Image (spheres, grey):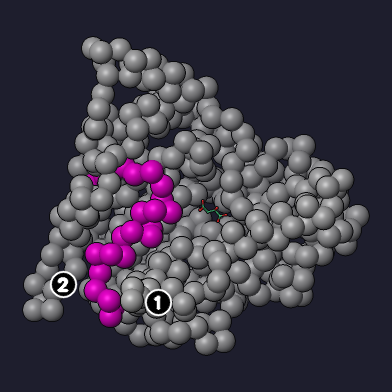
Amino acid sequence: MIRINENYTKLASSYLFADIARRVAAYVAANPSKPVIRLGIGDVTEPLPPVCVEALRAASAEMGERATFKGSGPEQGYAFLREAIAQNDYVERGCAISPDEIFVSDGAKCDCANIQELFAGDIRLAIPDPVYPVYLDTNVMAGRTGPSIGGRYQGVTYLESTAANGYVPDVPSVPTDLIYLCFPNNPTGAVATRAQLAAWVDYARRNHAVILFDSAYEAFIRDPQIPHSIYEIEGARDVALEFRSFSKTAGFTGTRCAYLVVPKGVVAYDTAGKPHSLHNLWNRRHTTKFNGVAYPVQKAAAATYTEEGRRQTRALADFYLGNAKLVRQAMGRLRLRCVGGDNAPYIWVNTGRDSWEFFDLLLNRAQVVCTPGAGFGRCGEGHVRISAFNSRENVVSALDRIARAL
Ligand code: MLT
């Protein structure tokens, strides 16, 4: 009799955003005359920047000609893209990252989910609360946690992000091995200062730990004091991996391109205490399980680094930040405290009541979808996340409906 991986039975029955989509679909089916506006899942709505569209067209034409056709490319990504990433996202910020430390992929979600395969089953995890559910759920699937009791998986060190610490968790008082950090944060929209990140790098170095730094939302940072990359912190190259994505930067949620930075000096140890390069292990995994991102998609991603591409992608982020500002102003008028939205596309609203109840209230009275904070962890209770990813017209209309409903 074939048996299942019983770690899956420890999980909540469905993924947060799948659960919300099901509830919204049921509402829409029951209320076909009431159009719903979605400020829930962080999915972009604005078209691709013109430089990307042009690059897709040109690369597709190349694929139609024998002389320029391409079959399988390098699993790690084409050199033209890895070089553009290293130069523009790192070297220009003073970070010594080389093109061969970059692994191009089809999404930061997959990379965050897959990276944990490199680590032993009994390592100690440090995971934020509230958290992007992928970090936690994938470790539950791999058997790195005990059962969930009272909304907390046993054996995990939760990094509580609350109003008391400005939604940036302090380093724990206990040693841990694998630390997940995300700044600008999903779901709270909080950003971490240089000093706060330096404390984490110092903690990781002292504990021979590894930081998994998710900076998928760095394009939204407007405060010049806030680091865009963990590698802006001295010593991070030895202890941190970084996830980046074109999804939110350039509207690639439906086009799919991202990358993972694995500096050559980051190591993890075997049971005999011998260090192993994570770069080598990830290269082994990537070449075995992944066949690369489509050539036209990589050309479109590379186009974001041209002068015109940089201007267009910045304008795209500015547009969503404009939405975020409207959300913050509207919450202020409703006397609801909130954070985020200044350097991030998410606004974390303190609703002062049960977060699923607030979700239902917005859906039923305003036909607006948000994300209940409790879905991101125990510390998310009492909050909802509002996403700035929508058209201006829809955001204005949603805020108007919310004002009338509350
Ligand atoms: C979110 O809403 O948190 C996003 O969908 C994250 C993602 O892109 O997976």
Q: Where is the N terminus found, in terms of image quarters?
A: bottom left
- Residue located beneath label 1 in the image: 7
Residue nearer the viewer, 282 or 5: 5
Residue 92 is situated, as x and y percent measured from the top left of the image, at 33, 38
Q: Where is the C terminus found, in terms of image quarters?
A: bottom right
Whether residue 44 appears in this view of the structure is yes
Tell how many labels: 2
Amino acid on which the number 1 mark rests in the picture: Asn
Amino acid on which the number 2 mark rests in the picture: Tyr
Residue nearer the viewer, 37 or 203: 37
Q: What element carries label 1?
A: helix
Most extreme residue toward the front is: 1
Apparent side of residue 57 relative to residue 29 in the rendered image (left or right)? left
Q: Badge 1 local density, few (<14 within 10 Å), some, or many (20+)?
A: some
Specify the label residue 178 is tagged with.
none
Q: Badge 2 local density, few (<14 within 10 Å), some, or many (20+)?
A: some
- Sooner in the amino-acid sequence: mark 1 or mark 2: 1
Residue drawn at 37 percent across, 20 percent down = 59
Residue 375 is situated, as x and y percent measured from the top left of the image, at 60, 69
Residue drawn at 33 percent across, 37 percent down = 293
Q: What stretch is highlighted in magenta?
A: 101-123
Whether residue 230 appears in this view of the structure is no
- Residue located beneath label 2 in the image: 269
Note whether ligand 1 is within 8 Å of mark 1: no
Residue 137 is situated, as x and y percent measured from the top left of the image, at 45, 69
